[in-house]
Amino acid sequence: MTTAPAMRKHAAGSSPIGVTRRVFSFPVAVAGLLSVLAVLSVRSRFDDPDMWWHLKTGQIIWTTRTIPTTDIFSYTTNHHAWVPHEWLSQVMIYSAYRFGGYSGLMFWLCFFTAAIFVAGYVLCCIYSGNAKVSFVGAMTIWFFATTGLAIRPQMIGYFLLVVELLLLHIGRSRNPRWFFGLPPLFAVWVNCHGSFFLGFLLAWIVLACSFFDFRMGLLVSERWVSHSRKMLIVALLFSLAALFLNPVGVRQVLYPLSITFREPINVGNVQEWLPLTMTSTRGLGLLAVLGCILLILMARQSQFFLDELLLLAAGTWLAMSHRRMLFVFGILAAPILSRLLAPLWDGYEADRDRPLPNAILMAASLLVLPLGFPNRQNLAGQVEAGSPVKAVEFIQRRHLSGPMMNDYVYGGYLIWAVPNHPVFIDGNADVFEWSGVLAQFGRWAMLQSNPNILLDKYRINFCVLARTSPMAHVMPLLPNWKTAYSDDMSMIFVRTSEISRPAQSPTALSRN
């Protein structure tokens, strides 16, 4: 992003009063408030369906010291190859569980949520030069981040995106040596989440804009000094090399492209990948942010920099194409909005700060943080409310055996809770689409084919389905099937007779 007015700095003093003003300052108090907001925002978001298979993968890596490169949880893909592009995040998630159980997982989520909000606030402060108006930027990030706050690797990816934007801005506006924080950043990022690809593209967009020097109405581009540009080029070349520091090499670097070109079913049907509904709350919020930026530009004749335009356009296109990318839009739009709003609000001056009210606010934040953190009973209740906990108890109590059919959203929990029962499908949709299983399951689950064909093909012995799924209403009507268990959430159906035809090998099943 482009150079913004520098924040007024309070000269560091050696006196106790100087230290007090720094510790009990307005920005630190805001960071405390954002931490409280993070805890309150995620305290009821513990049981994400994909959390469980990430947790199990992390456990396997932790205990075996090996990174799996094939599907090891299902019996339907015949150990199809997959890209462990999130292995480092999965290890972090499991380590949180290992040392703290459910509470450790919730702490992990609170920590990274707070890190994103606070780092986003710092980015807005440095970029806009106004610590007060930057709170609006932080709240913008919060509003759009609520689409994706969960115990999933994407949290680390989005935090690293904020850090990247900080490095790019500080490297340009202060010292280009900061650019050399990018290679280690990408070395970590490529092993944590596929958003590294987006971050890499955004960095090259910033670099491309550094060559232009023009003014077209309100649109402005400022050519960088050659030294800064050369430093960024070198840093990005090292970053490109750093991307190959991963378990599978080029396949992991190119993995994000597979979502676009090799996964039409996943992208076209999974809720978070669907296009944004512009009449939804967040759709209207996106339009409001864009409208606010446009209004300020027109009313105040403010400068709009080329890199800001391109980054904002990229974030808008991504968010409108896939609602999960609203998270990215918020991160990209917040500092731009803060810069444009900065002249409308008096800037922060450290020498006029009031430490006592800030200290009271910080003390209140420290009090609310532990009170807002959910206890173990609350977390266990969230798991039971969102996962087939009682159905799993029935499976274990009755010693059900044989191939299992399961709902898509149940796959992750079943992988964690009953690892001795390989799943039919789970949230790792990539490998199931590549192997053709996702298409088969989709037709079966949506009643687009004779349900007996798939059940017989894989010699399914019992099914674990959500009570609300279409097939839950069909299974009792099928011959040779009966309801064995039912609760408010889940149903289990068992086969009442053997399949007469010979069993097929797993290889044959995967090819049919």
Image (spheres, helix red, strand yellow):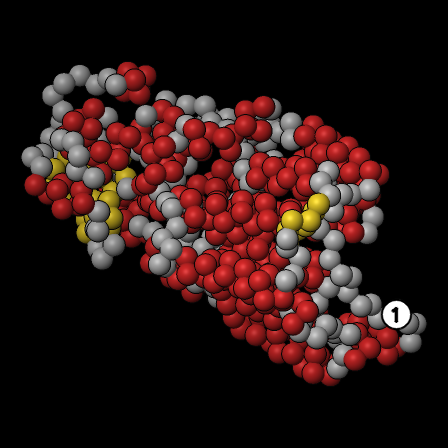
Left or right: residue 485 compared with residue 437:
left
Of all residues shown, which one is farthest toward the front? 217
Residue 191 position (above or below residue 154): above
Q: Amino acid at mark 1?
A: Ala
Residue 38 visible (yes or no)? no
Instruction: Please report the residue visible at 32 percent of the width from the left and 25 percent of the height from the top.
Output: 436
Query: Residue 84: where, in percent of width, then height?
Result: 52, 32
Whether 179 is drawn above or below 367: the answer is above
Is 510 in front, or is 233?
233
474 lies left or right of 365: left
The residue sitting at 62% across, 29% down in the picture is: 246
Number of marks in the image?
1
Image point (28%, 42%), residue name: 407
108 or 492, which lies in front?
Answer: 108
Image location of residue 307, percent across then percent down: 64, 46
Where residue 78 sits, quadrant-wise, is top left
Q: Is residue 203 above or below residue 22?
A: above
> How many residues crowd mark 1 within 10 Å: few (<14), some (14–19), many (20+)?
few
Within the image, what quadrant is residue 501 found in?
A: top left
Evaluate whether residue 476 shows in this view.
yes
Q: Is residue 48 left or right of residue 265?
A: right
Along the line of sight, which residue is nearer the eye, 393 or 18?
18
The residue labelled by disc 1 is: 11
Q: Quadrant of the C terminus?
A: top left
Label 1: state its secondary structure. Answer: loop
Question: Dividing the picture into quarters, in which one does residue 29 lie?
Answer: bottom right
In percent of the image, x 82 and y 42: which residue is there?
225
Find residue 187 and report its horizontal and vertical position in percent: 67, 35
